Amino acid sequence: MTQAELRLCSLLLQEHFGEIVEKVGNSLLRTGPRPLRLLVGDTGLLPDQHNLVRYEVQPRGSVEYEARSERILRILRYPRYIYTAKTLYGDPGELLVEELLLHGHLPMSCAVARVADRLTETMEDGKTMDYTEVSSTFVRLADTHFIQRCPIVPESPRSAKALPHSAPALAIDEKDMYIVPRLSLVGKGKRRHSCDEEEEEGEHKTKRQKQDGGSSETPPDDGIYWQVNLERFHQHFRDQALVSAVASRMDQTSSEVVRTMLRMSEVTTASGASHTQPLSSNEIFRSLPSGYNIGKQVLDQYLALLADDPLEFVGKSGDSGGGTYTVNLHKALVSLATATLESIVEERFGSRCARIFRLLLRKKHLEQKQVEDFAMIPAKEAKDMLYRMLSENLVSLQEIPKTPDHAPSRTFYLYTVNVMAAARMLLHRCYKSVANLMERRQHEMRENKRLLEKSQRVEAILASMQATGAEAAQLHEVEEMITGPERQQLETLKHNVNKIDASENQVDETIFVLESFIESTTKRP
């Protein structure tokens, strides 16, 4: 694990879970798997309910805990998961995913009640959110595999000889991961009451529990917990990037054909598959959106055009059913990663360097003289550009000796691009960039801490006065507690923090493309 990843993981744990969890996570990340007794010296709290740590039973029976750095880095992508759920499933979908990410895992009944309450808070007086509407969104999220059941302790046969395990192995059948329990959740969302009302309500609840014998009602789905399926979200992001690439290269209709193919196979295709399941031309035609009134013959022409494209996003796998086609996911990720590398080279070194970089990608191996001739760039400039990219590890130099003595006069020096090595290097830089952005945001907040606290106090006073029906003059007097320069300083702070947040999201998009490419390439046989 690189220092950049370690630093970013540490900052993410501190920002989202506090200093105690950050200390435990840091200890595990730096030292590797450790038994619990060695972690007790730091703190007794472990971030296990968010799947940030895995455990393993050793042969001698002890249990060792290990931090999952790849899962910690996913915290950076939480806003994107939530926004995607809102785009696909509206406000209930957004809040369900947010609650599951916030708590790590929740039973369906608990998640539905929390979301219904939050949605009711935002509605006009007299209106409430029904549990059934939130439940239907929950079922849709499970059907499309965006959420899944958490692994459980499998039931073991009752035997007198069976010894208790120091740490049970959690497991779940794949066929049960997306089955929603049949629950009749009846109710409506509740609004928050004032403190006095909450105390009275608590007293009534305590009295009812005493009358019922002191037993609190257990939820109908007790023991069945749900979590967000991050791999499914990543599959959706990959599909969106692929569709956008096809749209920019060809046209909107071509991208819609690819979108339809991806939508038809999104649940049946594994997250790490190199290509989708074969689909016949007839099936694709029947599944096209109703707004696209294109004939079968026109669709076949588009499919043939996509299959003949040099990028090979779509491949033809057979002739049955009017021709069967697949989306080549691995080649698409290679194209997206290569385009990202080209863009970075162009931004950092200019269009001429990008021309040389693309030339090396296409020709694989070239001598310096060949680069000058093919790129049509003067020798001195070409040499300078190649050495600049070589010093940044974007291109590499390969020596091919004619004789065993490796004499420079009898050796070919070929420039080439190792896409995997360049992608890993840029991914490492992206991690450093995000860590720098997070530290900058923390610095901005620390520098303006007093002003932010004052602003929050004033807003709280204004809210309480508005609730009691204060006059406009009184409200204006309270607002003037923040002076003009202070208000301007707050606006500047807000602008800077928004820019940092937007930059984080943009860097994360690059991280996602590079990570997906590296993972797809390393998984290939």
Image: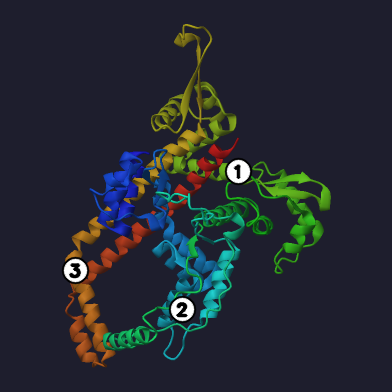
Q: What element carries label 3?
A: helix
From the viewer's side, name the closer residue of 405 and 226: 226
Residue 451 circle label: 3
Label 1 vs 2, first from the N-terminus:
2
Is residue 132 positioned above or below 172 on the image? below
Q: Please give the name of the residue rendered at 54% of the width and 78% of the height, measured from the top-left corner.
A: 133
Mark earlier in primary sequence (3, 2): 2
Res. 330 mark: 1
Left or right, 199 with reference to 422 = left
- All told, the count of numbered labels is 3
Do we see residue 440 in this rendering?
no
Q: In the rendered view of the protein, which quadrant contains the N terminus?
A: top left
Residue type highlighted by circle 3: Leu
| Front-most of residues 123 and 211 | 211
Evaluate whether residue 497 shows in this view: yes
Rendered image: mark on residue 116: 2
Q: How far apart are marks 1 and 2 (CA)?
A: 41 Å
Residue farthest toward the front in the current orientation of the protein: 160
Q: Is mark 2 on a helix, strand or loop?
A: helix
Q: Do the CB atoms of the residues marked 1 and 2 lie less than 8 Å apart?
A: no
For discs 1 and 3, the disc positioned in front in the rendered view? 1
Provide residue 257's location: percent of width, then percent of height: 69, 57
The structure's colour scheme is rainbow
Residue 472 figure quarter = bottom left
- Residue 219 versus residue 157: which sits nearer the camera? 157
Q: At label 2, which amino acid type do we have?
A: Ala
Mark 1 lies on a secondary structure that is helix
Quick one: label 1, few (<14), some, or many (20+) residues within 10 Å? Answer: many
